[in-house]
Image (cartoon, rainbow, N blue to C red):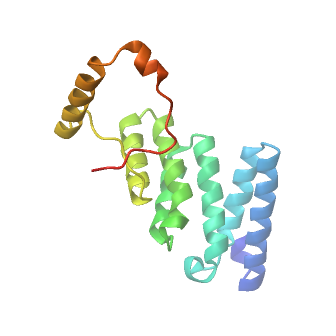
Amino acid sequence: GGPHLLSDPNQRNTISSLNLKAGKRCIEICDHDSAMKFYESGISFLNPGHWQHQYKCSLELFEAMVDVACTLNDAELFNRLSNELLLHARTYEDKLHTLCLSVRHLTLSKRVQEAADLAYEVLKRLGEDLPRSYGDIQLLTDIYAMKSKLSTMSDGYLLSLRQTSSRPKKT
């Protein structure tokens, strides 16, 4: 058998969902090779137009498969499936897990600068304050000003200061 022999869309959807569940069970027992086979089978049973009509199942299958491809270091499969998922994901939240896996994949591929750039892009998109670049003129000015202030204080005084729980307000 196979997906080409099954024409009923409801049955194909059921088989895709069952393969997703079986793959998740394999992951629970750390059998990534078997999980990949179940996820591949699940994807093969998705109906035409699945990104529109079976969005949740498609997203879960592709996310799971991308995760396994990353874990097994299958770069070609990882790139192909993550690109498809990122193309069809409806929201940034739906893309987030795959973007995080992309950072991991780039790091494992020794493409550390690309991984850092992507991580900063994701953090920025999520509204996080990013560290300033050391080449930032204002940062260098702030470092020099702090160094000047600290040079007038004794070690004993600095060690006696208590830690504050709030971040200083930006001016």
Measured along the vertical axis of the image, is residue 1 above or below residue 129?
below
Q: Residue at x 36, y 14 (%)?
A: 154
* Residue 32, x across and y down, in percent: 72, 45
Q: Residue at x 36, y 49 (%)?
A: 169
Which sits in the foreground, 154 or 79?
154
Measured along the vertical axis of the image, is residue 5 above or below residue 120?
below
Note whether residue 81 is visible. Answer: no
Q: Residue at x 50, y 74 (%)?
A: 90
* Residue 82, x across and y down, in percent: 51, 57
Note whether residue 77 is visible. Answer: yes
- 56 relative position to 136: left or right: right
Which sits in the foreground, 135 or 141?
141
Instruction: Report the number of discs.
Output: 0
Which sits in the foreground, 156 or 80?
156
Which sits in the foreground, 65 or 158?
158
* Residue 107, x across and y down, in percent: 47, 37
Measured along the vertical axis of the image, is residue 93 above or below residue 170?
below
Measured along the vertical axis of the image, is residue 19 above or below residue 111?
below
- 26 relative position to 43: left or right: right
Q: The N terminus appears in which quarter of the rendering?
A: bottom right
* Residue 49, x across and y down, in percent: 56, 81
Q: Residue at x 24, y 36 (%)?
A: 139
